[in-house]
Amino acid sequence: MTATESTAEREPGYRVELLRSVEQLPLDLWEQLAPADDPMWSRGVFTALERSRVGPDGYSYLTIRQGDVLAAVLPLCLFRELWLDRVVGPRERRLLAPLRRLAPGLLRVPMLFCGNLLGQGHVLAPGALGEEASRLLVAAVLDFARRERLGTVVFKDFAPADLDPLRTALQDADFFFLPSLPDTELPLESGSFEDYLAALPAKPRRNARSKIRKFEARSELRIEVLDDFQHLLPQLLALYRQVMDRADQTLDLLDASFLAAVQGGVDLRRRLVVCFEGERPVAFLLCLFAGSGATGARIGLDYRLAHEARLYHNVHYAAIRLAMATGCRRIRFAQTAYQPKLELGCELVEQWYAMTHVRPLPRAVLRRLLPRALSAALAEALRPHAAAPGPPEPARPEPAGPEAERHEERSRHATR
């Protein structure tokens, strides 16, 4: 998709453009606007998404210009037939199973995601987005959704500070706000990995040292950090699919073309932490870097020996060592498997959805049903460890805490 579509000028001084590829935005301009320390906003990630088939049916980039100045960029992901039972929890999937057999068409939902399919949501802008530009942006999103026949519109996984400039415009356009699962972030304040271990509370520290000893006792296993992993892609995908086969939700599913694009991305800092059994990969963690930030983006595990060898924890320990060695001040992981990540010392990062439907009746149904369902999913995922984030609207979800370590990737979520 390379065509540029321009609308008529909608507000004095502003115009809206719709770009069909991230490559239509100059790299230096993207790097000026994108969060400097968030690897998931590296342009190479969006290029890799466009070159792959990880879930969406298409991508667009809504831009607002004031004269010759780019005032805002909002990436869009188009799902023309998102299977609802792939993005809900196991309990909801069981309830929907008869419907999938009898009337599968009812489970295919046209949906537009605004932000970043694989990371935290932002509107890219050189400064605070003013009220006029915010209203124009929200109106342009809804216009686009109607033209593309995408009924449900979601601003996905926005931190409160990033949602606040849009809040009035979103509320006036009949969006409502829902807590999404928090991200997980580990501050890297220690001088070395040993200092990091020593700073953990007593029980997590003992557990970490035990897991490291059990891994090191397996002489057939070793961990390497690779820059070139093209030759391993078939084996890596097999490990990734083992994880995704156990996932509760599969909004996105990485493929060989995505990993190949990441491997070859010249404007993307990446390393692959790989655990080998002899010459055979048995675990990996894809790590991306930007500025002082790192992200453990996706994991693969061989469940044949994952538990006994503590593969999950040890590839994360290797990623922490790597991030420290490259001067990072923090590393983020995914919105899943909260118990082991809190044991690693991670903090929870509050995130939100803003959601609506372009038609009044479905919007009313969503507003009535989703808050209760999402609060229940949040409580189930977080369980007794940490309070779920408090909403920007009056109600506050019940306290909750981390999920068991059963899997790393429950995928990125649309509705929970």
Image: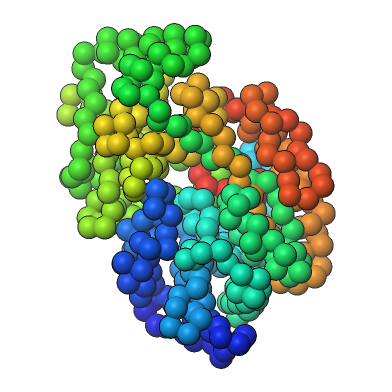
Location of the C terminus (image quadrant): top right
**Side of 278 relative to 358 (left or right):** left
Percent across and percent down for residue 157 are: 58, 51
Which residue appears at 53% of the width and 55% of the height?
121
Location of the N terminus (image quadrant): bottom left
> Which is more toward the observer, 33 or 47?
33
Which residue appears at 51% of the width and 10% of the height?
203
Is residue 29 placed above or below 401 in the rendered structure?
below
**Side of 122 relative to 319 (left or right):** right
Percent across and percent down for residue 187 are: 45, 32
The image quarter containing residue 109 is: bottom right
Percent across and percent down for residue 311 are: 36, 23
The image quarter containing residue 146 is: bottom right
Any part of residue 84 in sight: no
**Side of 8 relative to 21 (left or right):** right
**Side of 329 relative to 66 (left or right):** left
Is residue 131 placed above or below 160 in the rendered structure?
below
How many marks overall?
0
Percent across and percent down for residue 239 are: 34, 36
The image quarter containing residue 189 is: top left
Any part of residue 169 in sight: yes
Which residue appears at 49% of the width and 9% of the height?
202
Which residue appears at 57% of the width and 35% of the height?
348
- How is the model colour-coded? rainbow
